[in-house]
Image (cartoon, rainbow, N blue to C red):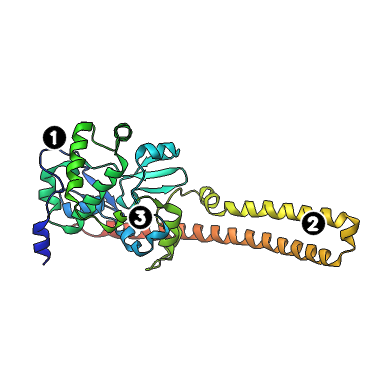
Amino acid sequence: MQETQNAALRPPFKADIITLRPPRNPVAVRHDSNLVRLKEDSKKWLQIELCVPKLNRLHSRLWLAGLQRPARALHRQRLMSREICMTESPDEHLVWYESHIFIKPLPDYLLSHEFWEKQLNADEELHRCATGLLLSYAWLVSHVSDFRIAKELGLLPESISWDEWYEFMDAFLDTNAPVNKRYQYGELRLSRLNLLHRLSAPFSTRQLVFGYMPMATWYQAFFKRNFSWILAVFVCVSVILSALQVGLATERLQKYQGFQNASYGFAVTSIIGVLVSLVLVFLVWGFLFSYHVLSRFWLHRHAAKVSKQPLA
């Protein structure tokens, strides 16, 4: 059955629409702690380049992180004052955080009819992921202004012209080829993805610490990103305590026992809240510090053990 499905796969566009130089593929790509070379394992290399396993694992809950509608075009991203950041990870493509959106450049080989026939038509999952990535560029680059932005940022091959791009996308959209289910959604919010990733099985310490997409590794940046809301709470509490102090200084409220009891209770609660917050921050810092030290220790031990093994 699988062979019958694969035999029916074909490139989602006509041959010879775009004439490009031979694709400039990387020699190797990093995967976990290893390098995967194209000439040694082309399927694994393409899976790293195109597949979205993390998002597919969260698919049933992706509605919490994004909407089932196309991503905004590049010119709209700029109108929203978003900084377009390049990423080579397909799992990070069209993920946004505050004023940043991450976009994977379109690989040259996805515009090659020959490459599709030799490498992508043999695997349905790769075919759907590659087709989905092309569909995302139909969203992003729909006007000449989008095309200019894409060329400026290096998201599209240098030698392609607008006329070629128009003809290519017209032929691609006519095929209505099936895509990976990730591309049922457009832009995805990183903060929601981090939460979903941390709460999804299988649970792990690494998953809890880093979330969906690790950002800055500085403790200062981590606490600013995750605990800045505490400062806002402290400001509100300070304003309320000041108001209570002013109220207690007035003659009318000094005689009102209920107000005095409420002021006393709020003051004590505020003191306890501050102490609990400080303890929580120090506990989180201690946990992160211990985790990073231990993880590096075990990584060092593993690397030392591997280096001592005799070469085959």
Q: Which disc, if any, is residue 19?
A: 1
Task: Calculate the distance from the C-alpha at mark 2 to the C-alpha at mark 1.
Answer: 74 Å
> Is residue 236 in view?
yes
Where residue 224 appears, as percent x and y from the top left, is: 55, 49
Q: Is residue 159 left or right of residue 198?
A: left
Which residue is more in the foreground, 237 or 225? 237
Marks 2 & 3, CB-CB < 8 Å contact? no
Badge 2 crowding class, 10 Å Cα cut-off, few under 14, some 14 to 19, many 20 or more, is some
Q: In the rendered image of this protein, does residue 57 appear above or below residue 164?
A: below
Return the x and y of residue 146 as percentages of the image width and height: 32, 35
Q: Is residue 237 left or right of residue 4?
A: right
Q: Residues within 10 Å of mark 3 (few under 14, many from 20)?
A: some
The residue closer to the viewer here, 122 or 72, is 72
Label 1 Cα crowd, 10 Å radius (few <14 / some 14-19 / many 20+):
few
* Residue bearing mark 2: 244
Give the secondary structure at mark 2. helix
| Closer to viewer: mark 2 or mark 3 | 3
Disc 1 marks a residue whose amino acid type is Thr
Q: Position of residue 285 (x, y in %)?
A: 54, 57
Residue under numbered circle 3: 68
Instruction: Please name the residue shown 61% across and 55% down the image.
Output: 230
